[in-house]
Image: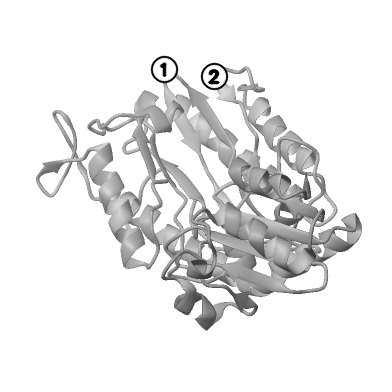
């Protein structure tokens, strides 16, 4: 949200005794959305915020009128600059507001060309993680946006689960309404349900069966058979740019072997992780307790485990599908962090089991942003 982004930058400018902060990126850039929150922009923008509190936005050609409707600072039309590149326009804005030789803060992932324009004009450019830290802590309105996206995510998973529950076992795999159930068919049904719920799949829908569920991003289309793990993992994006995350694993006509044990390990690991979540807890503690529960069921744990739980147990979610806080290093959970807890067990020969949920950290624990059953046997939803 623009006001929270501006406040994060303001603190960084004061702490670093800098004259200005600069960011350049396309409208879909999560940092830019956090700073500006102006929908319907089409071209890359330049954003400048000065230590004196001035906020300037130079959108791409033709976007100035749209920007003026929503941006609560000064909008400069791109045609008023003798420069096509947004980085050059950003440098011109800094020169006009701060003079020469200013200390300028940028995000670590600012385009290299933009930093070069600033340095060429004699400014001292240094990076700051202020936006990363600011984005990690969500305000009430951000949590509500995330909640709406997560509720839509449940509609997507429910569509796939219902189709599986209504399928029959045929000679060549599962059959639904006379047609073969394939991973691509399921993914299309999931994406259609997400669209009906008002969110975009953002290319993040993973549907994989059997051994492919151990590495779902590499999976090709295939028919789904009874007795094999069926992973449905979605991370849709809402109109405001915020993401969700929900994953469930189903087995039609499970025989109660490896898949049942893996699913029990993952769901118990989920419970163990949730028991630890709360303000003041380190993310590594949540990961350790989650991994310990998986290990208790006889599965390997660690980044080099070809079969088992390689982790991490979760990650932050917001304007990016993955953002701070990290579960790969020690970070302290704070009220307002929104995280996905996503334990899993995989085996390249047998399949993969994953359960992922989105929750907001509170002072005394957490609040799930949507509820969805964790059962392995698909049911009509």
115 vs 348, left or right, is right
Residue 367 location (% of width, % of height): 66, 63
Residue 21 location (% of width, % of height): 74, 59
> Looking at the image, which residue is at 57% across and 73% down?
76
Q: Residues within 10 Å of mark 2 (few under 14, many from 20)?
A: some
40 vs 282, left or right, is left
- Tell me the number on the disc at residue 124: none
- Extreme residue toward the front, this view: 82
Can residue 362 be seen here? Answer: yes
340 vs 167, left or right, is right
> Which of 211 and 129 lies nearest the eye of the viewer?
129
> Looking at the image, which residue is at 53% across and 80% down?
68
Displayed quadrant of residue 273? top right
- Tell me the number on the disc at residue 307: 2
- Extreme residue toward the left, this view: 178
> Which of 312 and 231 lies nearest the eye of the viewer?
312
> Looking at the image, which residue is at 32% across and 54% down?
191
Colour mode of the rendering: one colour
Q: Disc 1 designates what residue?
A: 349
Residue 221 drawn above or below residue 71: above
Residue 130 location (% of width, % of height): 76, 55
Can residue 271 be seen here? Answer: no
Residue 139 drawn above or below residue 319: below
Q: Earlier in the sequence, mark 1 or mark 2?
A: 2
């Amino acid at each position: 949200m623009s006001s929270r982004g501006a406040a994060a930058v303001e603190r960084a400018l004061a702490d670093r005794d800098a004259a200005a902060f600069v960011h350049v990126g396309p409208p879909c850039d999560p940092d830019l959305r956090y700073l500006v929150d102006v929908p319907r922009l089409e071209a890359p923008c330049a954003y400048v915020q000065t230590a004196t509190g001035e906020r300037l936005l130079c959108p791409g050609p033709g976007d100035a009128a749209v920007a003026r409707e929503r941006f609560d600072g000064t909008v400069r039309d791109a045609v008023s600059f003798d420069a096509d590149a947004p980085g050059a326009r950003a440098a011109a804005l800094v020169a006009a507001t701060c003079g020469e030789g200013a200390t300028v803060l940028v995000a670590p992932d600012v385009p290299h060309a933009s930093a070069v324009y600033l340095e060429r004009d004699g400014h001292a450019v240094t990076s700051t993680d202020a936006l990363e830290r600011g984005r990690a802590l969500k305000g009430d309105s951000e949590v509500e946006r995330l909640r709406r996206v997560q509720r839509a995510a449940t509609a997507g998973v429910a569509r796939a689960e219902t189709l599986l529950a209504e399928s029959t076992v045929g000679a060549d795999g599962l059959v639904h309404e006379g047609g073969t159930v394939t991973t691509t068919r399921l993914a299309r049904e999931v994406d259609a349900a997400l669209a009906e719920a008002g969110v975009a799949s953002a290319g993040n829908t993973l549907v994989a069966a059997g051994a492919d569920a151990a590495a779902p991003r590499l999976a090709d289309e295939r028919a789904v058979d009874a007795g094999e793990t069926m992973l449905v993992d979605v991370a849709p994006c809402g109109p405001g740019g915020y993401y969700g995350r929900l994953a469930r694993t189903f087995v039609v006509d499970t025989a109660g072997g490896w898949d049942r044990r893996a699913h029990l390990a993952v769901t118990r690991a989920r419970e163990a992780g949730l028991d630890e979540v709360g303000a003041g807890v380190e993310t590594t503690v949540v990961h350790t307790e989650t991994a310990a529960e998986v290990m208790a069921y006889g599965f390997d744990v660690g980044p080099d485990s070809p079969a088992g739980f390689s982790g991490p147990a979760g990650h932050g979610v917001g304007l990016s599908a993955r953002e701070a806080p990290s579960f790969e290093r020690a970070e302290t959970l704070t009220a307002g962090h929104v995280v996905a807890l996503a334990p899993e067990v995989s085996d390249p020969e047998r399949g993969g089991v994953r359960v992922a949920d989105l929750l907001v950290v509170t002072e005394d624990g957490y609040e799930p942003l949507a509820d969805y059953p964790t059962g392995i046997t698909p049911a009509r939803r």
